[in-house]
Image (cartoon, grey):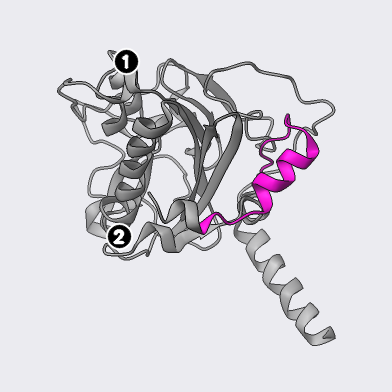
Amino acid sequence: MRRLFLITALLLLATAAIQPDVVNSQDTDTAPEIHCKHFIGGYPLGAPASNDMIIRDLYALSSNDETKFADWVCYRLTPQETFGDLDLKRKWHNDPWLDDSETLEARPESADDYDDAHSVEDYDRGHMAPLASFRGSRYASQVNFYSNITPQKADMNEGPWMRLESAERDLVVQYETIWVMTGTLYESSMNCLPGCDETHTVPSGFWKIVVVDDAGSLRAAGFIMGQDTPRGANFRDYLTTIQVIEARSGLDFFWELPAQTEYVLESSTPSEWVGEW
């Protein structure tokens, strides 16, 4: 038993050495109550105090100055935003609310920070708040800001991650409104973007939490996928508890809810429910 404890402790220390500076800069007693339609049970708590929190029509995010990517992104989906006939285009933009040194850059007249991304690890420009989920919104171009983009390996991004995003849209049909929280993990070293001139850290994995209000009771499901997740994988196989996501991300979710409600949401693995998606 002592040997097992020592091995576990060493693994946790190794992970901490890789993990960027994500700390619980606030606790639930001192954290400000920020009222925003994209948050359910409170925004994800625990990102560095130096992060920029950005709230837009379609999403809210916390942008990390060190990694150059969002620690978390939250968005709410309803039929009004999700379904429509807009011609969605992937036209990349710099985030006007961030300094050039705080995020990656889209430079239409010169080299883009994502140029040659496929040559190293077959990275896509992966939307955290997905473009395809806002076909009914005139604000859809907001999701093409680079603050909402992360390098995601094509097999994961175009396979199980995309199918999970599609399942979210199906849930909008069933429940009318859903909330999604998603973010980055840094648990192993990844190759950097070869065309990027800023110091950055590419995520090794991603988490997602999907929440619905089912006749007055909240239901939630959490998922974690690594960058090497196969294209043909079933997203349901990556279901996990929200407690695990908290432990691995350093964030705290649902902290504004009653303690018992928070515990039930975070400790359950709703396999049967997710199996219906």
In the picture, the disc for residue 121 is: 2
Say left or right for 92 vs 251: left
Given residues 128 and 216, the one toward you in this image is 216
Q: Amino acid at mark 1?
A: Tyr
Residue 203 at least partly seen: no
Secondary structure at numbered mark 1: loop
* Residue occupying image coordinates x 53% and y 50%: 222
Q: Badge 1: how crowded within 10 Å, few (<14), some, or many (20+)?
A: few
Is residue 86 highlighted in magenta?
no
- Residue 97 shows in the view: yes
- Look at 33% across and 55% down and name the residue there: 160
50 left or right of 237 in image? right
Q: Mark 1 = which residue?
A: 139
Q: Nearer the viewer, residue 233 or 263?
A: 263
Place of residue 219 in the rendered image (x, y in percent of width and height, measured from the top left)? 57, 41
Q: Which of the marked residues, 2 or 1, is nearer the chain's N terminus?
A: 2
Residue 165: x, y in percent? 34, 42
The magenta-colored residue range is 251-271
